[in-house]
Image (cartoon, rainbow, N blue to C red):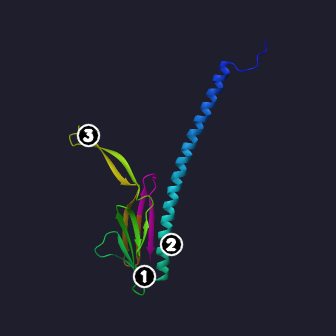
Amino acid sequence: MNKKGFTTIELIVSFIMVVVILTSLIGFTTAYRGKVNDEEVKSQLFDFKNTILKTVYDDIIRYSVVRMSECVGEDNCVNFIGKDESVHTLKVEVETSGVYINYNGTRYLLPDSNLNKVYEETYTDMDGNTQYTRNVTDSACNITDFKYTNYQNKIFTVKISFKHYLIDEEYDILITLN
């Protein structure tokens, strides 16, 4: 007898093959979506960095900035001083609404610094037995370092480092004047 159709075994094998293919496609699209998100964050951080650098270096050229100095009475703040003694201020401002880099009154919001991530931390007491956990809320993107360096009044540098929690790389804004 010549029956036209599929046997049960053929149907089960076909179904298993379709499931395997769909599972691998789902894994691929999930990994791809994660990479796209990471690249988007990197692009935003890179654009932020370039915007700050372009603005500052344009003023360094325009006003013939000859030296830098720390702001009096303020942390994370530097003054750029031109030949005509004009002062241009760069400072980092941390607020509940986000982290800003303020340059001459124009505030640039650090990408995702206004977004919070919540994670759990576990602590162990001194005796090593008692553990407790707590939820910690932290900004998705933070300034990790601000350094001002003056090398014998000849070379001045400002380094602002920042990091996004999704990316293992640290980004720096490095401004050098000599």
Q: Which residue is mark 1?
A: 66
| Nearer the camera: disc 1 or disc 3 | 3
Identify the residue at image location x=57%, y=39%: 26
**Left or right of 97, for residue 33:** right
Q: CA distance from mark 1 to mark 3?
A: 55 Å
Are circles 1 and 2 on residues that touch, CB within 8 Å? no
Q: CA distance from mark 1 to mark 2?
A: 17 Å
Query: Which residue occupies the extreme left position in the image?
Result: 127
Identify the residue at image location x=46%, y=55%: 169
Image quarter for residue 67? bottom left
Please tell me how crowded label 1 is: few (under 14), some (14-19), or many (20+) other residues with Cα within 10 Å. some
**Quadrant location, the N terminus:** top right
Identify the residue at image location x=54%, y=44%: 31
Relative to 174, residue 59 above or below: below
Q: Which residues are magenta?
A: 161-178
Q: Which residue is mark 2?
A: 54
| Nearer the camera: disc 1 or disc 2 | 2
Q: Which residue is mark 3?
A: 131
Q: CA distance from mark 2 to mark 3?
A: 49 Å
Which amino acid, mark 1?
Val
Q: Is 76 colored magenta in this rendering?
A: no
**Quadrant location, the C terminus:** bottom left
In percent of width and height, residue 82 lies at 42, 83
- The kind of secondary structure element at disc 3 is strand
Q: Is 177 colored magenta in this rendering?
A: yes
Query: Which residue occupies the extreme bottom position in the image?
Result: 84
Query: Which residue occupies the extreme right position in the image?
Result: 2
Which amino acid, mark 2?
Lys
**Left or right of 11, for residue 33:** left
Q: Which comes before the other along the chain, label 1 or label 2?
A: 2
